[in-house]
């Protein structure tokens, strides 16, 4: 939402109006203190109030996400109630009285997740929508699954995934023709209009509420477990595994899936296995962050494990680490692109094995435009379709004929017939299926990565991110790159540049530059959609020579690109 310039008097009036409709004791007390201090002229309090009230958390394709605190620019019960009422109005308008809309609502273990979910259920039920609340805190993929399994109009998941501890969020899925995928434009704008109308016209305390919502039966979770477990065959041999839930909600469901599929229960990181909204053992509850897997590595060394499996707090992402004695921790975390390549190869092999007689395998592999070109190489080798989408599973999941999709930020979709979103639990099972089949042949995931390099080529990837305090810096860099396109990067000549902003074609318009270089390397430049960062994704490849020669060539090219890109995007 566009910032609103307010006088201090107008600011205090807006804050008092918000306070009068806030049902939460904690945020009421916090806001009341700020109002009193602001009214006394305290500059820090007024600055804090301006930050909370001069703009509003925008509802977009990712729903809502932000810090829990009072005010429209924070996550709280007032904002969530407005969002629920607005979403209810959207669903009612969409059906236009032809049928009763329905919604399933889930929540994770973060602060206020349960109360945000129950507020949503009560407001939906009072609006005449069949509201179904999942029976307890559960992973995000369960909501995406339940939208299809229960054949409802929509789904809401209350989660901030792997954000900082005091954040929460509100993620929306659609049923019917959308098949349980996340919303995309222009639906987000339609919902946002309804939310803003509620915010302008209604007092949250006066919104109708009803406790006549349903609690989903355990059979919903059981169906997810059974369908997910069917992805893998009972293993003949298994690697020794350590698992961490990163203080999130993945463990109970993952354990049930493993048991149903006939896999051994892994050793767990005890300090991180139960949900804890404070995330006390990690600075940032994201398995990609440095140090996040330290306790898992420690546990893996203690039990002499071969493999580490980690879910993020809402279990829609998967991190994997393999034994590597050259690393100080004794383990190396695989990149999202490496895991995506392994799982994509698995999907292609399954399709190839299922093809009958002379009929070739069919299906589509998909990944986001910033993910490794390795998946394209797999599709080409097996005669499959390949599709690139904009970043986000709201796009990947909508690919026609999809059999496997991924994005480099640890997101994988291995079972599109069951879930139309990234799913860290089913991906973990699929990865264990690969590892177990290899173990039966005396091989490891490291061996499989080597085999991949020799069959498809060595692919290397990296990312350069620049965090800014002024978003205009990003605008200036993107404008300069368009006005003065580079002729070379790191001494490697530029072959062509695709500008995806308003360009038309297969992809929706997006502020992205895709730069192809003479040696087959690729550079993708885009502003982050969630943080004040400019992100640059680098990909190199080599298909010549021995394994060592391929690795050296790809790594050398990557180093040159990294150095060149830092110069290129300097503002």
Image (cartoon, rainbow, N blue to C red):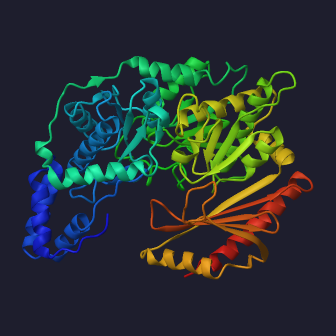
Relative placement, left or right, of 308 versus 354 is: left
**Which residue lies at the image location 17% right of the left edge and 30% below the top edge?**
210
In front: 43, or 222? 222
User: For residue 314, which quarter of the picture?
Assistant: top left
Task: Identify the image quadrant of the N terminus.
Answer: bottom left
**Which residue lies at the image location 26% right of the left edge and 38% below the top edge?**
120
Relative placement, left or right, of 122 versus 566 is: left
Q: Residue furthest right?
A: 545
- Residue 62 in the image: x percent, y percent? 42, 50
- Residue 237 in the image: x percent, y percent? 72, 22
Residue 165 in view of the camera = no
Residue 554 in view of the camera = yes
- Residue 291 in the image: x percent, y percent? 53, 53
In front: 239, or 494? 494
196 to 418, vertically: above or below: below
Task: Identify the image quadrant of the C terminus.
Answer: bottom right
User: For residue 381, which quarter of the picture?
Assistant: top right
User: For residue 357, which quarter of the picture?
Assistant: top right
Relative placement, left or right, of 521 versus 190 is: right
- Residue 294 in the image: x percent, y percent? 54, 48
């Amino acid at each position: 939402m566009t910032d609103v310039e307010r006088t201090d008097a107008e600011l205090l009036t807006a804050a008092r109006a918000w306070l009068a409709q806030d049902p939460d004791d904690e945020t009421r007390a916090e806001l009341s203190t700020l109002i009193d201090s602001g009214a006394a002229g305290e500059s820090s309090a007024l600055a804090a109030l301006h930050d909370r009230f001069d703009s509003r958390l925008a509802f977009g394709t990712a729903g809502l996400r932000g810090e829990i605190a009072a005010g429209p620019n924070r996550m709280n019960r007032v904002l969530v109630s407005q969002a629920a009422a607005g979403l209810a109005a959207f669903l009612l308008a969409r059906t236009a009285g032809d049928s009763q809309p329905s919604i399933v609502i889930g929540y994770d273990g973060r602060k206020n997740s349960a109360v945000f979910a129950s507020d949503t259920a009560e407001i939906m039920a009072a609006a005449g929508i069949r509201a179904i609340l999942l029976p307890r805190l559960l992973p995000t993929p369960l909501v995406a699954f339940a939208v299809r399994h229960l054949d409802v109009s929509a789904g809401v998941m209350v989660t901030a995934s792997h954000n900082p501890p005091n954040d929460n969020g509100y993620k929306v899925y659609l049923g019917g023709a959308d098949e349980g995928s996340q919303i995309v434009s222009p639906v987000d704008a339609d919902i946002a209009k309804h939310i803003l109308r509620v915010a302008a016209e209604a007092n949250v305390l006066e919104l109708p509420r009803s406790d006549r919502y349903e609690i989903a039966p355990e059979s919903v979770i059981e169906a997810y477990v059974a369908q997910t477990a069917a992805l893998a065959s009972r293993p003949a041999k298994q690697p020794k595994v350590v698992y961490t839930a990163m203080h999130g909600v993945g463990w109970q469901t993952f354990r049930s899936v493993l048991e149903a599929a006939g896999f051994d229960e892994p050793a767990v990181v005890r300090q991180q296995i139960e949900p804890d909204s404070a995330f006390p053992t990690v600075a940032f509850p994201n398995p990609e962050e440095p140090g996040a897997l330290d306790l898992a590595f420690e546990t893996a060394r203690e039990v002499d494990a071969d493999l580490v499996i980690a879910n993020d707090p809402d279990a829609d992402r998967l991190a994997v680490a393999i034994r590597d004695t050259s690393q100080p921790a004794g383990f190396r975390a695989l990149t999202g692109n490496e895991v995506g390549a392994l799982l994509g190869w698995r999907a292609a092999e399954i399709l190839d094995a299922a093809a009958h007689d002379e009929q070739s395998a069919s299906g589509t592999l998909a990944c986001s435009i910033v993910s490794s070109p390795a998946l394209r190489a797999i599709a080409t080798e097996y005669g499959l379709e390949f599709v690139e989408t904009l970043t986000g599973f709201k796009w990947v999941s909508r690919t026609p004929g999809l059999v496997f999709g991924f994005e480099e930020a640890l997101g994988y979709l291995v079972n599109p017939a069951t879930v139309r979103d990234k799913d860290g639990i089913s991906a973990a099972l699929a990865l264990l299926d690969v590892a177990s089949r290899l173990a039966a042949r005396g091989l490891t995931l490291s061996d499989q990565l080597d085999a991949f390099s020799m069959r498809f080529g060595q692919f290397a990837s990296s990312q350069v991110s620049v965090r800014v305090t002024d978003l205009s810096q990003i605008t200036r860099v993107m404008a300069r790159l368009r006005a003065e396109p580079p002729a070379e990067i790191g001494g490697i000549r530029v072959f062509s540049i695709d500008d995806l902003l308003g360009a038309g074609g297969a992809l929706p318009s997006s502020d992205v530059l895709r730069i192809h270089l003479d040696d087959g390397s690729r550079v993708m430049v885009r502003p982050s959609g969630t943080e004040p960062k400019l992100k640059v994704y680098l990909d190199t490849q080599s298909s010549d020579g021995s394994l060592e020669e391929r690795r050296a060539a790809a790594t050398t090219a990557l180093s040159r690109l990294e150095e060149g890109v830092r110069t290129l995007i300097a503002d």
